[in-house]
Amino acid sequence: MDRIVLHSDMNSFYASVEQAERPELHGKPVVVAGKEELRHGIVLTKSVEAKRFGIKTGEALWQAREKCPDLIVLPPRYRLYRRYSELARSIYYQYTDLVEPFGLDECWLDITGSVGLAGGDALVVAREISERIKAELGCTVSVGVSWNKIFAKFGSDYRKPDAITAITRDNYRDVVWPAPVRDLLYVGPATERKLHEYGIDTIGGLAHASDAYLTRRLGKMGLVLRTFARGEDATTVKPYDPATRTVDRVIKSYGNGLTAPHDLTCPADAKALIWLLSESVAQRMREDRVRARTIAIGVRNGTDLCGYGRQTHLARPTAATRTVAHAAWDLLTSNEPLDAEHPIRALHVRASDLVWPGPYEQTSLFDLVEPDYEGLDRAIDDLRRRFGNTCVVRGAELVDDRLAGVDIKADNTVHPVSYFHR
Amino acid sequence: MVRGIQTRRKRYVEVLARIDPDGTVTPVSITWEDGRVFRIDRVLDARRASSLKVGGCGMRYLVEIGGRATYLFFENPRWFVEEIVPGVPRADGGLG
């Protein structure tokens, strides 16, 4: 028997929550956006009404205001959104224990085992969930119903807001296959371009592409995407643990990034940010008792806002802030001149290729033994645990007043985890 | 526009409630800011719901006070009622 998977997507989540909390905002163009003075002033979510003006997520606020002068701009209230997200999940739990969140506003539900309670009709369950969210939270959801997670997600995106779409074995060739290939989960602009070069523009086209081509252009990912397109994805809906608020999955990397309050145009500023980010990344690794062998940076420059990434491998896995920061700093200085002509808008530091230390560690026989920086870090971590994250600060971070006081680790919120992290 | 919205506002109130060993919460009385205590005679209904009049969501109790029914919301940890605002809406759409 086929599984029954629902994908529930809360429409314009942040904006809908604001409208549910403040009824006077109903029917008005509302966007939730970051702080403009910190230059995080981009649209995070737009209400249905704001969407009609052509406002897009990720747009700068001045662009949005140009399209709609009466736009209401609200700062994000993540604690509130998390509360609504938890309330929605508590409704999902009354239908199944297999609830896998994908970000704050989306969830997969496997109701194969419980659909009998609703007379065996998945659409009855979908309708009930949708109506309860509307009555109990004051927000709308769009729900996709299918036999696999990929098509369920496609269904919830197919019609919105406040809609239910069933993708069945009878209709997927007519509904999913004619859709543009970018509507498939994990087909981004780069993949879309590669597929387009080969004349593949629809999901149906991808479903019929040959092994040889897909592997040549997209590697093993090509075959995975074709499995998605054919509706053969068999990944299960992971049970979510409400106590730890995580899905049981293996962490593959630790990363932090920040758009700087002002463009970085000198080595001191860039160094401060690199240390700030490395500190958070390394501290999180130490808390989870892992070390990383690969350090990567992401750079977004201030002139054309284009970005790139570079990475390096370490001789020995580490969780020491100093080692992570030095690796990241070396990567940055070998790629960027760090002067006024080459301003940097945002930086990202990521540690991957993780190892879980065993009872002993093989050290190098020939290299000089490095001092135990992790011991120093552990002492600092302990101070921070007791007195707050900003009680001990690196000298490099002090050169920039505007960065001082930024607590990357505590501000590090829950981001949607990747589908492939398992 | 939702009707009635200009004549109501969200009012957080002090509530005395009884919590049974099984976790059931039953509001017993509401204390208004001027010190008046309104005893809740009966709880007619309890369900999760959002307030369409003043916004917000939580456990919604339909309670009977002095023969009249009204909504009391438990937003966890705060309680609020949809307070009736005396006076007429101002011309600018604000509350009187």
Image: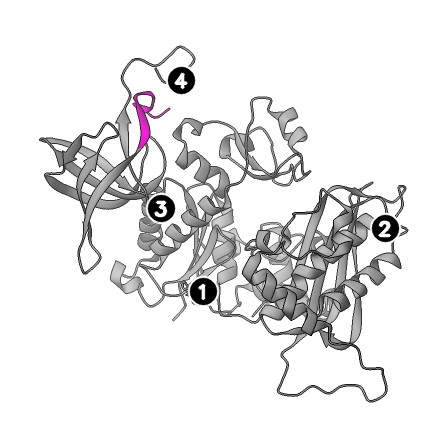
Q: Is residue A114 left or right of residue A86?
A: left
Q: Quadrant of the C terminus of chain A?
A: bottom right
Label 1, label 2: how far apart the Cα atoms are:
40 Å
> How dense is the environment of label 3, judged by Cα within 10 Å: few (below 14), some, or many (20 and up)?
many
- Amino acid type assigned to the residue bearing label 1 in the image: Thr
Residue linked to disc 4? B94
Q: Closer to the observer: label 3 or label 1? A: 1
Residue linked to disc 1? A244
| Residue A10 is inside the magenta segment | no
Residue linked to disc 3? A133
Q: Is residue A197 visible?
A: no
User: For the residue labelled by badge 2, is the local secondary structure a helix, a strand or a loop?
Assistant: helix
User: For the residue labelled by badge 4, is the local secondary structure a helix, a strand or a loop?
Assistant: loop
Disc 3 and disc 2 on one polypeptide chain: yes
Q: Which mark is residue A267?
A: 2
Q: Which residues are magenta?
A: B1-11
A259 vs A279, nearest the viewer: A279
